Image (cartoon, grey):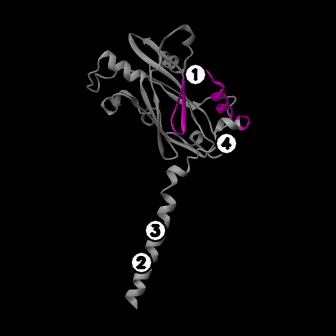
Amino acid sequence: MCMGSHRIHIIKIKKIILCLLLLLLPVGCSHNDTSDKLIDHYDELNISMKHYFDEKDLPTYSGKYIEVKVKKIIRFNYNGNIIYVYDLLIAPIYNQKTRINSIKLSSIEYGKDVEKLYYELNYVYGKLGNDIYNRKTIDKIVGLEYEFFLDDNSALYGYSLSDVQYQSCLTNICMTVNINGYKDKIYLSDLTITDYTDEDENNRVISYIVETNKAYGTLHAYADPSEFDN
């Protein structure tokens, strides 16, 4: 009797554990609902998402849950060193609870072989905080603006890149966004780079580097600070 009771007790425990696992396993995917697009709720959206959707003429690239628009990529000569300044817009596609845990860049063509060419957002610019990146209702979901720069640091890490290979690293970029536990890959291919002009002097990244001589990047809601109610 004791052995039978013991066995029944173990079976019950196993069933409980199995039920818990079944509840936990779908989390990464079930939070990513594709039945309802944000664009269909324009009037209900946060001002940053409205600004994002109002940018209708920009090159646009889509993953499964995330969309990226390219505002501009600037080739800038800073004291004889050429840097490439990127201004990208990032937004969820669907109306769902949204938590963005990380954003990482890599080369489409060369992948891990040149991974250190790309600065790790969480390492260089600080951890992504919950204030902007964990949103539960449609009026709180934000469109993001990601501004950063890349330069040729290949010698520092022992990479041997030809000019053609380096240009591919600059213009064919995979952006991996961890949204609700899913790593969404957006392939930004054949990007266009333009030379710096006087119109770019107020670019956040360029102006900060020129004024402070320090590296800089920023990820923020795509709206004027006075418009954005956090």
Label 4 to label 3, Cα distance in Å? 34 Å
Q: Earlier in the sequence, mark 1 or mark 3?
A: 3
Q: Mark 1 or mark 3: which is in front?
A: 1
Q: Earlier in the sequence, mark 3 or mark 2?
A: 2
* Mark seen at residue 17: 3
Q: Earlier in the sequence, mark 4 or mark 1?
A: 1
Magenta range:
42-69
**Label 1 residue SS:** loop
Residue extending furthest toward the bottom: 1
Q: Mark 4 or mark 1: which is in front?
A: 1
**Label 4 residue SS:** loop
Residue receiving disc 1: 58
Q: Amino acid at mark 3?
A: Ile
**Label 3 residue SS:** helix
Residue drawn at (42%, 27%) of the image: 173
Q: Amino acid at mark 1?
A: Leu
* Mark seen at residue 138: 4
Residue extending furthest toward the right: 43
User: Does residue 164 show up magenta in the picture?
Assistant: no
* Mark seen at residue 10: 2
Q: Amino acid at mark 2?
A: Ile
Q: Amino acid at mark 4?
A: Ile
- Up/down of 29 relative to 191, above or below: below
